[in-house]
Amino acid sequence: MKAILALEDGSIFKGNSFGAEGEVIGEIVFNTGMTGYQEILTDPSYCGQIVTMTYPLIGNYGVNIDDFESIKPQVKGFIVRELCKTPSNWRSTETLNEYLKRYNIIGIEEIDTRALTRILRDKGTMNGIISTDPNFDIRQRLDEIKNFRINNPVDEVTCKEIQKYPGEGYKVAVIDLGAKANIIRSLVNRGCDVIVFPARSSADEILRHNPDGIMLSNGPGDPKDCSEVIKNIKKLMDSGKPIFGICLGHQLTALANGADTQRLKYGHRGCNHPVKDIKKDLTYITSQNHGYTIVEASLDKTKAEISHINMNDGTIEGVRYKDRPVFTVQFHPEASPGPKDTAYLFDEFLELMKIYGKGKN
């Protein structure tokens, strides 16, 4: 079936639909990964967004039951240059088309994704619509497209009740702001006793479980919308517990310490972003998915130091807080693009819990 992608600046791309039929409005972003589309589709940080894959052929290894980051697709729509109709992989259980159709996610293919990406790079991330309506008229929908906003997406993707993953090691409280499954898996694989809390859980409730450490997960949306979570992070930091923040957790920790965040023009999304660990003097290839960054000038250097920087644009990729056992990173050490280049950060978190957690109990 024919489909149209229309952007809020009036740009129109014509192609063919796959997955579901109908229409969907969302924030158009692009991801530069050559693989990993299954993880991308199910990453809660993409809630409210329509994702464009810059790599031209997508779907060639199908969909399997092992590589999900959440229980269902989180994207609002999916854009590719060419959809592979006949995937080949021993783990594949269905095609990408079948998977998206099952979850009523609209996709569009056979459009010039290079031209679309250049528009987003030049003009910045913008809203758009995918429609299979043969009578679609952008003039009648332009205001609706422009006015679209992702409202409180963290509330949409967080767990609804406490979840437990028993282990014999350190007890870790994970605040689920839209946590990828591999964050929890990375902790469980290190023997941790993991308790996952809904995003709006109070600091008092979390501390009542007496965790040895606290993990602040990734998640979608503007970090400044999470005012209640920011207040809780302040209390959690005052408890003296070791804290490790990833992506949105990184941004919220900065806000809790008086720093500011700002929106990036088109964000960092992909599995090939170079990040330098300043102390180690080493550059790692990282996986990223975010549209906001910490404003460096707003960071109080007497209380915090920059630990990692982005080698493409110099933005802050990691912060360590000097007066307490807290560190955060903007990238995803659990995503294993290296494949395990930055997994050492989880081990550093365990070391902090050894010193400040059970080591003091």
Image: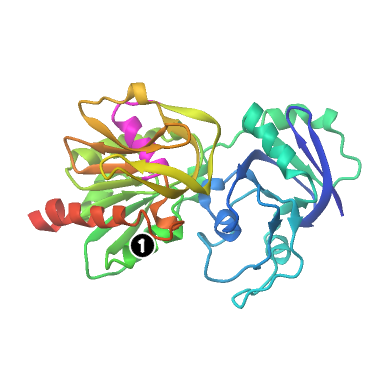
Q: Is residue 93 above or below residue 37?
A: below
Quadrant containing the N terminus in the rendered view: bottom right
Residue 161 lies in what quarter of the image?
bottom left
Quadrant containing the C terminus in the rendered view: bottom left
Q: In front here: 358 or 190?
A: 190
Q: Secondary structure at mark 1?
A: helix
Q: Say which residue appears at 19% left-offset and 38% top-offset.
A: 238
Q: Residue 11, percent across and down? A: 78, 32
Which residue is under mark 1? 186
Q: Residue 261, percent across and down? A: 42, 28
In the image: residue 142, left or right of residue 91: right
In this orientation, does residue 126 appear?
no
In the image, the segment drawn in magenta is: 246-260
Q: Say which residue appears at 26% left-offset and 35% top-offset.
A: 234
In the image: residue 342, left or right of residue 80: left
Q: Residue 242, percent across and down? A: 21, 48
Q: In front here: 349 or 231?
A: 349
